[in-house]
Image (tube, grey):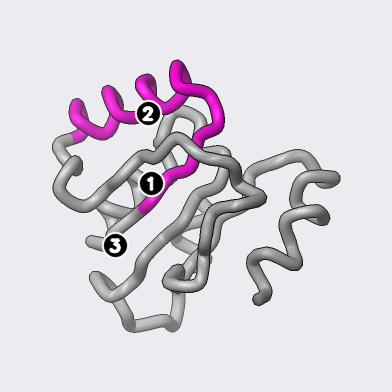
Amino acid sequence: MHWSQASDRGRGHEGDDLVYDPGCGDGKILIAAAKQFRARAVGIEYEADGAQLARRNVARAGVESTVNIIIGDIFVEDFTKATVVTLYLLLELNLKLRPTILR
């Protein structure tokens, strides 16, 4: 089962979520959130080249109106508006990021 299928079970909030993906890479998680669940989504990528790749993929998928890719530091960005935060990072980064997400 894909993460997005598991995370959406029983929620009943299709279209209401704001998904944040720190270290979004190629943007595929954000694209899936937008297409499958009509979620708004924000990807955070530290490297400009990575952000450009994600933006190209978002544009190709036709979800640029609901997905925003920003260049930023995942340890500085504000996640307080997020209703879903995805973490596909190294364990050390997940643990370091946890206090930021839980505030």
Residue 88 point in image, percent of width and height: 63, 44
Secondary element at image label 3: loop
Mark 2 to mark 3 CA distance (whole Å):
17 Å
Secondary element at image label 1: helix
Q: Nearer the viewer, mark 2 or mark 3?
A: 2
Residue found at x 82% / y 56%: 95
Is 94 above or below relative to 63? below
Mark 3 — residue? 39
> In the picture provided, is 39 more to the left or to the right than 21?
left
76 or 68: nearer the eye?
A: 76
Mark 1 — residue? 30
Residue 51 point in image, percent of width and height: 41, 27
The quarter in which the C terminus is drawn is: bottom right
> In the picture provided, is 49 more to the left or to the right than 73?
left
Give me the disc on residue 54. Answer: 2
4 or 43: nearer the eye?
A: 43
